Amino acid sequence: MLAYIIRRVAQSVLVLLVTGFVAFSMFSFVGDPVENMLGQERTQADVDRLRDQLGLDRPFAVQYWKFLEQAVQGNFGLSYRQGRPVSEILAERLPATLELAAVSGLLALLGGIGFGIFTAIRRRGAAANVIMTVSLIGVSLPTFLIGILLIYVFSVELGWLPSFGRGDVVNLGGWSTGFLTQSGLKALVLPAITLGLYQMTLIMRLVRTEMLEVLRMDYIRFSRARGLRERAINFRHALKNTLVPVITITGLQLGSIIAFAIITETVFQWPGVGLLFINAIQFVDIPVMAAYLMMISVMFVAINLIVDLLYFAIDPRLRIDGKAGGH
Amino acid sequence: MSEPVLSVRDLVVEIPTRRGILRPVDGVSYDITKGEILGVVGESGAGKSMTGNAVIGLLDRPARIASGEILLTGEPIHHLKGEALRRLRGRRMGMIFQDPLTSLNPLLTVGDQLTETILEHLPVSRAKALNRAVAALDEVGIPAARQRIGSYPHEFSGGMRQRVVIALALCAEPELVIADEPTTALDVSVQAQIIALLKRLCRERGVAVMLVTHDMGVIAEAADRVAVMYAGRLAELGPVRDVVGRARHPYTTGLMASTPDASRGQRRLRQIPGSMPRLDALPEGCPFHPRCDRAEVRCRQAPGPSLTACDGRAACWFPMHQPEETPA
């Protein structure tokens, strides 16, 4: 098991090196930031000075090594646009994205598993059919459209919830949270639903399919023959057996919730890292883009690692170092 | 004789389909008394398992009990549903399935699965339930039961798993156990052990056992009485020695002849010509007549013979081995 973890961590490092290379390559191959930074009134001397300052005139390999060296220390250089350290800007923006992702992730997980079980157990019922039909909409409508529809209904027509921004935030030692104010909580509702709806319907459909599969297994039939209650059969026996594939997908989906919060953050002008990234693209602010890319890949790698470890917690058959079999 | 533990009377199971109603079980009647093993044999699709499932109330929809009675120690249970039926399952009747590899939940320890069953049915504390679980494993011959209680199913071999399954079926002390092909998925050497175990538990506890199998060898070894099923009906019902030794129904004779027997030294196994008719294409008259070399006009035209209409043992108009005494 320890060997397995070490192997997985080594693989993760390799993945990060590759994404690091891709992120860094942007410096060399995507546009020329100097043009943007200096504007129209510039001299060749200005350009050269800035190039020297940013290290853009050095050889590719040297630049890559310097990038890696600094990235490991959490230093991604200065933002071309704001002239401040990228890590500082990210740290400022990250709480907004993480809070949004956490709320929508929780929504997706609880709603997805709950509805999934319900539609599997009562698969012939009217309510289950309605949920399945609605979920089809959730799966097929693009995120931005859902966001705009929600804004139209709840902000424009009904006026219940704000259409953009985070509301009032409270600063807790460098972490700005919207959980503590009423306007902060209200502002969370629409973006969280927008971001979580797709994931929720996806998890729900997955749970339902897996659950229907498991409910056909012999051990479920045997549980019935032993006279166990339906609740025990559904939740204790069936649900646990659906969890391995569900956790795999859910883990990946939670990763994409953070990564692809970009669209939701743009629709709701949510001041998180996604919006920062979009603005960075418009300005060819490469250090910000590179740092964002690295941050997302670290998250994905970490989530995958956690998912793999969760398998061990759920399925005893994978714990190969267990007691010997009674053959 | 005391009241039978299980009485099945004219049981009919129906499956409505688009092309009409199928009857996988059609007018089956039998009793099982305390401490008795009734073997139910027949080909695949003869309705053996369906009968067992009907008794324990686990028919898969749309199959349903259409008519007839099922009495558990005299009380009718065929009309029970939901909660009332659930209380009987595990507590008063247990079931053992064919494949021990898939009958146990892979993610729960055998101890968890035993204690949850015991706690569901018996008014005991968790600690007592655990002790009973250990005793149950011990009784079915799991060595070092107390140490194995925390093991997961995959840590046991196939035969040991079937023992665990039997312990699970018996842990709330039911009066009736339905064993649906309990040895089919096991190695031959393990089969004998499992059969011996079933026989011992049946004798020691006085449990009534319905042993569903297609293996005549298992029947000869374990059963006290035998019910032979064909196309959803009982073909023959009687004490194992009579049915195996002096079969009256031509189908039983055919079944016996197609069982390999080393002592007979035959070179080629006999087989019954043809195959069992599909349920949606049952022939007129006796369902066996197209394959029967003794069939006469009456077999083709008269409605299918039943045990009661014939000599009480074989549902055949022209049974073999005519009894010396006059039929009842």
Image (cartoon, rainbow, N blue to C red):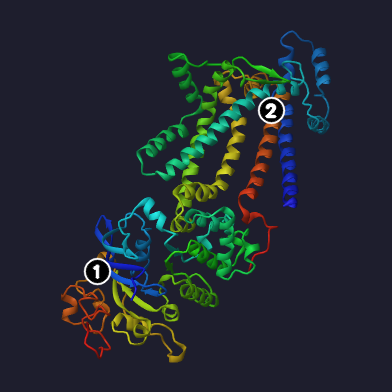
Foreground residue among B41 and A264: B41
Is residue A189 something one can see in this rendering? yes
How far across and how far down the image is residue A35, in percent? Answer: 72, 16
How far across and how far down the image is residue A268, in percent? Answer: 55, 19
Left or right position of A320 against A207? right
Where, quadrant-wise, is the C terminus of chain B in this rendering?
A: bottom left
Residue corresponding to mark 2: A292
Q: Quadrant of residue B128?
A: bottom right
Q: B324 above or below A221?
A: below
Foreground residue among A16 and B3: B3
Label ID, residue A104: none
Q: A46 above or below A32?
A: above
How far across and how far down the image is residue B240, in percent? Answer: 37, 82
Which SS class for mark 1?
A: loop
Which chain hosts label 2?
A
Is residue B231 something one can see in this rendering? no
Which SS class for mark 2?
A: helix
Q: Which residue is drawn at 27% across and 56% down?
A: B17
Q: Residue at x 20, y 76 (%)?
A: B309
In this rendering, the label closer to the viewer, 1 or 2: 1
C-alpha separation, residue under disc 1 versus residue under disc 2: 72 Å
Identify residue type, mark 1: Leu
Residue corresponding to mark 1: B282
Q: Do the residues labelled 1 and 2 touch (CB within 8 Å)?
A: no
Left or right position of A188 against B311? right
